[in-house]
Image: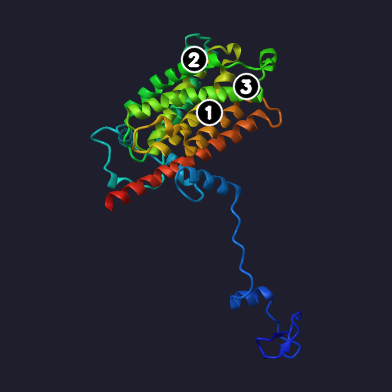
Amino acid sequence: MQVCPHCGHSVPATAKFCPVCGRPLPTPTQTTAATGAGPKKQPRRQSLYDDATARLNHYAGEEGAVKVNLKDLFSAVFQHHTKAEAESIFIAGTETTTPPLDALSAAWVKPWLFSRILLGFLLAFIALLFMAVEFQNPNAIPGLILVGAFAVPVSGLVFFFEANAFQDISLYEVMRVFFIGGIFALIATVFLYQFVSFSQTNQMTGMLTLGDSLSIGVVEELGKLVITCYFINQLRIRHILGGLLIGAAVGAGFAAFETAGYIYRSGNLLVEVAVLRGWSAIGGHLVWAAIAGGAVMVVKRAKPLRLTDLFDTRFLVFFGLAILLHAAWDWDIGIIGPYFKLLLLIIAAWIIVFVLMSAGLKEVTHLQQRAQS
């Protein structure tokens, strides 16, 4: 039985209207909401994205899912900017331009200069392509190779440079790591390949099995990691965002010089290879090495880097993900289309990067609070 809230008479529990006054009776959910009684409402289940980013964020030293508003993050790309604004970005990181800790902001940076760099490369590529095709001028080919190989890695590197909220690494140092680090990472990789053998399937058909792809992922990511760790120690990097930047510089250099070689050897497919490897570079060596660099700083922080840090679970999780992303990228799997596979891997890689960036921005707040206590 239940009581009619309108006239006070007892009515059957299953009744929807009071037989005495005829007015509608509240449903069980309405009664529960009004009285606060009854079973509690189950908490909303997290989405797959929230659950994944929360787990990764835990290994980065923070808690909770990572929310990234891409529209807000890239909002400055479509705004007008002056030459002075661009120059102020490029002069960051020197002894006189590195801001003090209390002047830093933990808010997401809104990079934009990288888009102007990319646009400049794109225009140069189109101009060189026109020169090579319409005028049959072979002198345009070397420039076409270099621009096609360097466009996305360099533009992506500028994005990481802008995203370094600490502004404590100069463009000079970044470009030094890009050229020297990228080349020596290639040399380290070639050396490590001496200890790897590929499957008979690869030798007979040229296709990469899962084992072959994993070998490539381990060798190339390990080669870049060695060089990234060297520069992190040499430049005395102290923050996660700095680790992301140094890793990105090594990865960008590696990608640019490797892609130039692939384009050079592509023959009549020069333009096709340049375009494919150009746009897909946004989710390749650039971000894989950035993930590794950020992961190094998650375990290193301000102390000197020790070999034991590289066996820390927090580092191994992120570095392992970089290897798996690389392996999946190279694996000749026929389950899904190649372009769709690349798109999924690019999205996955940038989600991991954004988790590390979020932890790096929270590091600003932690350091400021520690300085005030």
> Mark 3 = which residue?
212
Residue 323: give x, y in percent of width and height: 55, 29
Q: Rate crowding at label 2 as few (under 14), some (14 to 19) or many (20 or more) other CA atoms within 10 Å.
A: few
Q: What element carries label 1?
A: loop
Q: How far is the residue under mark 3 from the one under mark 2? A: 17 Å
Q: Where is residue 205 in the image (x, y as percent from the top left)?
A: 69, 15
Nearest to the observer: residue 348 or residue 22: 348
Residue plotted at (65% across, 28% down): 338
Considering only vertical position in the picture, is 266 above or below 122? above
Location of residue 321 in the rendering, given as x and y in whole percent from the top left corner: 55, 34
Q: Residue 267 carries which label?
A: none
Residue that label 2 marks: 191
Q: Which quarter of the figure is the N terminus placed in?
A: bottom right
Who's the residue at 52% across and 27% down the image?
Answer: 281
Is residue 134 something that shows in the picture? no
Crowding at mark 3 (Cα within 10 Å: few <14, some 14-19, many 20+): many
Distance, label 1 to label 3, CA atoms, is: 18 Å
Q: What residue type is labelled 2?
A: Phe
Q: Give the secondary structure at mark 3.
A: helix
Give the residue pinned by disc 1.
284
Does label 1 or label 3 sit earlier along the sequence? 3
The three-letter code of the residue at mark 1 reads: Gly
Q: Can residue 336 be seen from the camera position used here?
A: yes
| Element type at mark 2 | helix
Question: Which of 81 and 149 lies nearest the eye of the viewer?
Answer: 149
